[in-house]
Amino acid sequence: MSNNGQIVRLDDITKIYTTRTESYSAVKDINFKAERGKLILILGPSGSGKTTLLTIMAGFLKPSTGEVHLFGKNVNDYSPRELQRLRAEKIGFVFQTFLLIDSLSVYENIALVNNFLINKPRNSKERIFAAMERVGIAHLSKKRPAELSHGERQRVAIARAFMNSAELLIADEPTASIEAEQGETIISLLHNCITESNACVIVASHDQRLKHLADRCYILENGMLNGNG
Amino acid sequence: MYVLRILIAKPLRFVLTVTGISLCVILILFILGVYNGVAEGSIEYIKKTPADIWVLQGYNTNIIRGTSILPAYYVDVISRDSLIESATPVLLFLTNVIAGNDSATVLLTGYVPGAAGGPPAIIEGREIREDNDIILDKSFGVKHRIGIGGTIFIKDDTLNVVGLSSGTNAFVTQYAFVTLKYLQSIIELPGLASLFIIKAKDERSIPSIMSAITKRFGRNLSLFTHRKFLLNNIREMESGILPLFFAITVIGGIVLAIILSLILSVNILEKRRDFAVMKILGSPQWFLDKLIIAQALTITLAALLLGVAAYFPLLICIKYVSPEVTAPIGFWHIFVVTLVTIVISLLSSLLACKKTRSIYPLEVFQ
């Protein structure tokens, strides 16, 4: 599946958006790789192309040029159904706006992703509670997202992301909507997940203070990626 | 759980949708019931009459939508056949009667007391004996508040109600039974009959009897076995009302489908973000389809329960206002309506399922 623990590889990726009057490159000539057991930070201001880059990595968006390799295979070689299964079984997502379903409880939000699996684990309930305990929200299981603080909501999103033992976690501005102190907690929770399940975590953020928590850090500016990768 | 949450999130909308669909269910059940009642009332008289052969005027096939006029003395000629056990004339005549303060139309059926051609079942009272006796259909009696011992006026005559019959409510009109002699007298054509009812001594001799009558009267008479005559009348009854009932049922079904499609589409529109989130998280299309179908089935089943539960009290109310309207339904009717409604709800959800396919996962970032 993956080469030498390599989960994501981007080769010369460029994404050009075209409007009626102009066209511009959201990301340009990007080469990038991410391996298991690493927390990789992509730092960039708002509008630098972070979300575009992450959606390309997850196979939602096709690049204008270049190749995306996910779990050792070119994304173009995956059928839509294979990509969907990949997202359900191997990729977890954490977003700035949490993307929780308001009408479901914390427990149900986390349990929801279990329904996307073809072979559901037998001990689903235990796994859901374990995921909640891992991020310290087991006592909130019956609450609705609207009743939680932003930090708690993000914990729910992390629990959901790791519910199906994701091998790749993509987090887009996971600390943007929460206070700085809680932001560090969120990042350390993601770190714990790496330690426990040897996953690869890719975090896109504008928050420079997270730099010291990452194993590797890239800077995305005007669609160009620079860094120690 | 999510399905219920979506539906209950807007309780008024849910209640209105379920009520709307249950009204469609009631309409369809009512049409089926009315058909059932009409079918039963229209042919029960023929079905229950102990006849082996029915004889009508030539080229007539039924008594639902046909006028048969025969010279009554033919029956004397026919009954000379030694294979015949009995042959009796019956005269049918649509006329106005005065019942209480109302003027009403009945299908007066004149027959020989004690012979075939009388009411299929007398549920109250007795057979007619005298020329001023009359047996009314039970629903006619209820509608006009006339029971045993009451009186009916025909022309200048006063007739005593001596019995009430069932299976004689032909929806648009009801049967009323008098003596053949009396009916012949009021139309002032004493030698007239509408049909003859023949009972054979032995069923095996029916073809021989029919052939002998045909030989004697040629095309002046139409002869039918009991089964064939029953089928002719059923076909006639169906050709008259089935297209209308079918059209009403189809309209009910279309309204049901439209309400359901609309409500499912509105729910998708409102929960578009949730569906996009599920797609981002790796939801397969079948899971989203399942959510839509579960919504459609939940609404449909709630509407079916409400519709069936409300149907029977509604029937009592209708019976109170219009006793002649009978719309009995049984398990089989409920089963068919349930099946049809579920099929419609599944078809309606197809459109909604198609809508979810067009939801783009990245919409969540907009």
Image: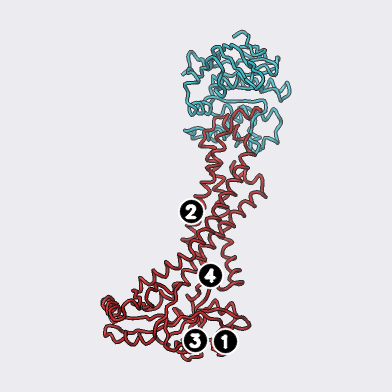
Chain colours: A cyan, B red
**Label 4 sits on what residue type?**
Thr
Q: Which residue is mark 2?
A: B339
Determine the chain carrying the residue at label 1: B
Amino acid type at mark 3: Ile
Residue B326: assigned label: 4
Residue at 56% in and 24% down: A60
Residue B147: x and y in percent read 56, 83
Determine whether B324 is above or below B256 in the image.
below
**Amino acid type, callout 1:** Phe
Q: Earlier in the sequence, mark 4 or mark 3?
A: 3
Crowding near pointer 3: few (<14 within 10 Å), some, many (20+)? few
**Which dot, 1 or 4, sits closer to the camera?**
1
Q: Which mark is residue B187?
A: 3
Marks 2 and 3: which is nearer the front?
A: 3
| SS of the residue under disc 1 | strand
CB under 8 Å between callouts 4 and 2? no
